[in-house]
Amino acid sequence: MVKLGIFDRLSVRLTAAFLLAAILGVALVAVLAYRSTSSEFSAFIQHMEAMERMMGHGMMRGMMGGQTFAQAEREFLDNLGRTLWIAGLSGAALAMFLGYLFTRQIVAPLSKVSHAARRVAQGDLGQRVEIHGSGELAELGESFNLMAATLSRDQELRQNMVADIAHELRTPLSILQGNVEAMLDGVMEANAENLTLLHQEIVLLARLIEDLRTLSLAEAGQLRFQPQATDLKEVSRQVIDGFQAQMAAKKVNLRLEAPDDLPQAWVDPERIAQVMRNLLSNALRYTPESGDITVRLTPGSDGITVSVTDTGAGIAPKDLPYIFDRFYRVDRSRTRSTGGSGLGLAIVKQLVEAQGGRVWAESTPGKGSTFAFHVPYSPK
Ligand code: ADP
């Protein structure tokens, strides 16, 4: 904490400023009043002396009761001086009092914010300040509260993510550990069939780690993109080709619908292929045998919408808002058995949004789902 000297304090500085302004104001009035009254007085005396000369000596002396004009001037100026001193001192006292009152109103909320900021720095992210009214101080309070809320939400997200990752890594690792130990103890045979199962767990683990890496890089804005004019129909065809064997095995019917004159989109073709692979692999995973999957490319006014529609089980409305969150799965056990990491859609969202696009999902439980994204024609 910074050690403040007495003159570093805002309250002392503001009160001193008030005091100085009052003293300078009164001094200025005093000098001006003194100068103007003394010159007025001299003019008046000269005028009276001229009258005296004109009207005869004895008469004016009688009017002044024997006093000289010079004496009268001195007395008047002394009186004026005294009054100005009294006015000056009371003005200064009033300035100090008002300065103290105003300063308190400014400094008290500032101290509140500074105290709360120190508590936040010490890790107490629940700190909030209450500043009433409107104006800059209330705005400062609001900004502080917003900052504290964001920090606390980020911390919660980070903690949840670490817990989620630990949980996700533990499952395949404990399966591997259990099985390898069983083989070492001779309870399980180390034959090709059992080793294939272990190999599948290792592949799953490697995929999870790779997905985590992609997601964390994308969230940190550190993933490299090489956007260029891209033919999305060509990208879709290549991605679909890669799924031919799986589709044939599941007897799934896949259609690609796109107009012949589809304009090019401004995206990184590799990253968009990754997005489409994730959507297609989900569609394939959640669509029963002999189902249909349709990939549709629709040109719009400012970009192209790509949608992947399946005739799978669909997603309940209560799950739909969370579907793009990391590690969110509608049915944990079923997804694991089909090889999902729970990160596929979170990666889709990050990759599309980083390229100036947006993603969404629609679904009718029992009928199927549509996952779609929109990407621009030109750089944003
Ligand atoms: P996962 O690797 O588990 O599939 P995703 O992030 O890709 O993770 O998907 C999250 C969840 O969304 C899935 O666990 C699944 O419950 C649901 N989901 C994704 N795609 C579909 C789909 N086409 N049909 C039904 N449910 C889906």
Image: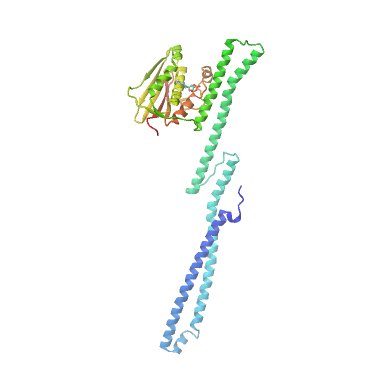
* In this rendering, position of residue 271 left or right of residue 6: left
Please provide percent x and percent y for residue 241: 42, 17
Residue 201 appears in view: yes
- The residue lying at 62 percent from left, 18 percent from top is 177
Question: What residue do we see at 52% from left, 55% from top?
Answer: 102
- Quadrant location of the C terminus in the rendered image: top left
Decide if residue 315 is in sight here: no
x and y percentages locating residue 15 in the rendered image: 55, 58
Give residue 356's position: percent from left, percent from top. 42, 32
Query: Residue 348 versus residue 81: which sits nearer the camera?
Result: 348
Q: Residue at x 36, y 31 (%)?
A: 302
In the rendered structure, the answer to whether residue 185 lies left or right of residue 36 reads right
Rendered view: 6 above or below 333 = below
Q: How is the image coloured?
A: rainbow
Pinpoint residue 346: horizontal percent, then vertical percent: 49, 27
Closest to the observer, 136 or 300: 300
